[in-house]
Amino acid sequence: MGREVSESCIDSLLTEMVSSYCNRFYSNTPELAARRIEAIGYQVGHQLSERYTMERPRFTEHLEAIKFICKDFWSELFKKQIDNLKTNHRGTFVLQDNKFRWLSRMSGDPSVENGTQDPESKAAQAMSMYLYFPCGIIRGALSNLGIPCAVSADISSLPAYLGRSLRDDKSIDVRCGLLLHCSVTMCPSENALFVNHEAGSS
């Protein structure tokens, strides 16, 4: 649907953006850093959604828009479709990605994964900042499709880096995958959508 960008460039961009806003521009106000990162993602998602739907008729139902996000939009952005889509038929949709690519090459402290360190530690909170950009992208994409929404993210664990020595003294990377849940719930009072992302190790 458009020009491609190397995944290493995306990784570097995301890393530098989060580092700049958290450590330089808003080092004492992480909530403002998160807001700015999410706002950048919103603009990106809004424009990408407009580009990817340029030759499509306007979606008339929320389910059509959700399916577009799960298949076409997710494939363009993360190189794979959503692994599972569920609904309770009362306005709630659950999107599941068994290996969220943008965080799959990041690693957390294994001690956090094993429960020996407080998951609300400073390091864990810093890593959670990396989800605001993709959350903003999804919110922007849905907004462009006529679906106002709020997006929040929660990380219970991150891929852990495990180094294993071989006989030739080399090492290999072993990373556990990242499971991402995206819950979309209609807000009857405002006729809007609430999008909630929850991540956990698979």
Image (tube, helix red, strand yellow):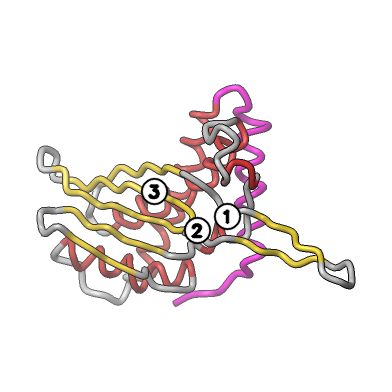
Disc 3 residue crowd, few under 14, some 14–19, many 20+, Cα 10 Å: some
Q: Secondary structure at mark 2?
A: strand
Q: Earlier in the sequence, mark 3 or mark 2?
A: 2
Residue at the image point whose x is 30% and y is 48% from the top: 195
Q: Secondary structure at mark 1?
A: loop
Q: Residue 31's x, y, as percent? A: 49, 29
**Relative to the observer, which residue lies in front, 51 or 95?**
95
Evaluate if marks 1 and 3 touch, with contact meaning CB atoms under 8 Å apart: no
- Residue range corresponding to the magenta coloring: 1-29
Residue placed farthest to the right in the image?
Answer: 168
Q: Amino acid at mark 1?
A: Pro
The residue indicated by pointer 3 is 198
Q: In the figure, is residue 9 to the left or right of 158?
A: right
Q: Residue 100's x, y, as percent? A: 48, 61
**Relative to the observer, which residue lies in front, 102 or 45?**
102
Q: Residue 201's x, y, as percent? A: 49, 55
Quadrant into which the N terminus falls: bottom left
Evaluate if marks 1 and 2 touch, with contact meaning CB atoms under 8 Å apart: yes
Q: Secondary structure at mark 3?
A: strand
- The answer to which image quadrant residue 152 occupies is top left
The residue indicated by pointer 1 is 159
Q: Amino acid at mark 3?
A: Glu
Q: Amino acid at mark 2?
A: Leu
Looking at the image, is mark 1 or mark 3 nearer the viewer?
Answer: 1
The answer to if 7 sits in the magenta stretch is: yes
- The answer to which image quadrant residue 162 occupies is bottom right
Residue at the image point whose x is 37% and y is 55% from the top: 138
**Distance from the alpha carbon under mark 1 to that under mark 2:** 6 Å
Q: Earlier in the sequence, mark 1 or mark 2?
A: 1
Q: Is residue 41 above or below residue 119?
A: below
The residue indicated by pointer 2 is 178
Q: In the figure, is residue 141 to the left or right of 160?
A: left
